[in-house]
Amino acid sequence: MDAEDEELLAQLRAEAHSQEPPPVHTMLDDVVRRGRRRLRARRMGATLGVVAVVAGVGVATSVLRDNLPGSGLTADHLSAASSVSTSPTLSGWAIPPQVTSTRADSTDCSNGVSVPGEPKADPVDIDHLNKVLLTSLRDIAPKATSKITRSTAVNKPATGDATLGSTWADVVDSGGGGSVYIEVHGFSGTPTQAADNEQFVNGVCTPPQRKTLADGTVMQLYGELKYDPGHPSQALRVYTPAHRLYVVTSEGFASPDWTQVANAEPGTLAVPEGAGRHSLPLTEDQLTAIGERVAALG
């Protein structure tokens, strides 16, 4: 374990064991910054089978518990997160050239691309985003019931890599309650450079699928994550020529699955381990269809 890893674990344990009510987090970067440290923290949180959102913020973050793993993330944890595929599952999509550094155990891929410039931090029209999301859901999943459950726009983001806006929508069908979560960021470099830099953003070594649209938008689809079988998830990252990143995530839980976190400030919610519909609410085709519509927002 290197010095950076030790610093990360110290920060995470300090947060997990704090007796004070947790501060309102606007994003996971309050615990760790961009790059490998943020990705590892997200993966650690995911292994606990808990996801949380803070009232009044609407931005997803991991909740760290007393059983926070130290170096106990094994190959078994990671192999359960996704199924390895070396060929695309969607027509018109491809596996991009891998630009990464991989540890000898092949269970920890980190991003190895230097992207020039600073991310843009333009405001987000959250009402327009919500309208596009709901319209898309009703078109691609007409038998499901969809509604926005919470959304937030950050009018004056502190940095370009901050979360600029986010929105949640419940998607309920015969399989149970699921949701779609969209988070908006800026990015620097070209869409392809940014996508290359985040090929392994979930911390596992399964290569994503990629499609480039006519206007230069790059869409990158990641494999299904099953850290908790009760609520699997799958993410699509959409990089537009306007330097806007939309992270569209299909989640196997809905707002009724949220519960108040004990000994935390009111409104700090979590999805308990095992809760959820045990499946994704959207197929890959449906998720990418939402991504194409969101991409048109620029």
Image (cartoon, helix red, strand yellow):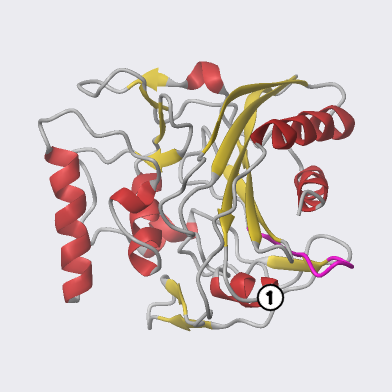
- In the image, the segment drawn in magenta is 213-222
On screen, residue 51 versus residue 139, left or right, reads left
Query: Which residue is identified by label 1?
Result: 192
Q: Residue furthest left?
A: 19
- Classify mark 1: helix, strand or loop: helix
Q: Is residue 214 magenta?
A: yes
Q: Quadrant of residue 283?
A: top right
Tell me which secondary structure the magenta stretch mostly adopts. Answer: loop
Q: Nearer the viewer, residue 85 or 46?
A: 46
Q: Nearer the viewer, residue 52 or 48?
A: 52
Q: Which residue sits at x=79%, y=61%?
A: 89
User: Which image quadrant: the C terminus?
Assistant: bottom right
On screen, residue 206 versus residue 288, left or right, reads left
Return the x and y of residue 286 as percentages of the image width and height.
80, 43
Q: Nearer the viewer, residue 131 or 261?
A: 131
Q: Which residue sits at x=59%, y=53%?
A: 122
Q: Nearer the viewer, residue 40 or 126?
A: 126
Q: Quadrant of residue 264?
A: top left
Return the x and y of residue 65 as percentages of the image width and height.
23, 38
Number of residues whose C-alpha sits closer than 10 Å to that of mark 1, classed few (under 14), some (14–19) or many (20 or more):
many
The amino acid marked with disc number 1 is Thr
Is 288 drawn above or below residue 78 in the view shown?
above
On screen, residue 187 versus residue 295, left or right, reads left
Q: Which residue sits at x=49%, y=82%?
A: 114
